[in-house]
Image (cartoon, rainbow, N blue to C red):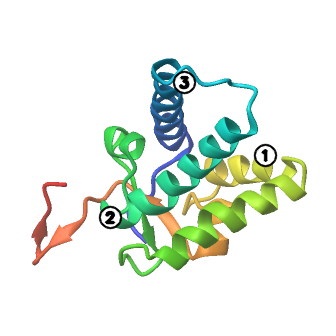
Amino acid sequence: MTNPGGFWIRLLGMILDALLISGVIGLSIFLFNLDTSAQTVQTGESVLSILYFVLVPILWHGYTVGKRIAGVRIVKKDNTEVSFFTMVLRYILGGLVYGLTFGIALIVSAIMVAARKDKRAIHDFIAGTYVTRDRPEEKGTAARA
């Protein structure tokens, strides 16, 4: 594991991703005149978020839009790219752990990222991942992702 991304840069990426998803959902609500109290809109928001956080890193070398802007990406502990199973563990199972502990595990994760040398959170341990500032490599050279 090399060049781990710390607390503040990861937080920046998360905030940027939240703004992007909120913007897409807000624009959809406005354009299609959707009832925001409807269960369909809330379910759609959840599905969009899950798809975004699970699929985008798989398709884009561990980046989400927010992480790309912040200059960090998710990789497996052995520095290989993430898979569908890895991202399901990281995002969905990690999210369940945070929810089942009423957010206490989330606070512990934030402290872990701030204090640990490897900057890994609970969801990173669950999925066998970490967040790095290193760019992906293509055929032995740095990629232009």
Quarter occupied by the N terminus: bottom left
- 47, 35: nearer the viewer: 35
Closest to the camera, between mark 2 and mark 1, is 2
Distance in Å between CA atoms under marks 3 and 1 = 32 Å
The residue indicated by pointer 1 is 107
Instruction: Please tell me how crowded label 2 is: few (under 14), some (14-19), or many (20+) other residues with Cα within 10 Å.
Output: some
Q: Secondary structure at mark 2?
A: helix
State whether residue 8 is above or below residue 64.
above
Q: Residue at x 86, y 49 (%)?
A: 104
Q: Eyeballing the image, is 65 above or below 100?
A: above
Q: Which residue is mark 2?
A: 59
Determine the residue positioned at 36% across, 54% down: 63
**Mark 3 and 1 residues: CB-CB less than 8 Å, in contact?**
no
User: Label 2 vs label 1: CA separation?
Assistant: 29 Å
Give the answer, above or below, for where 77 lies relative to 94: below
Q: Does dot 3 land on a helix, a strand or a loop?
A: helix
Point 48% across, 38% down: residue: 17
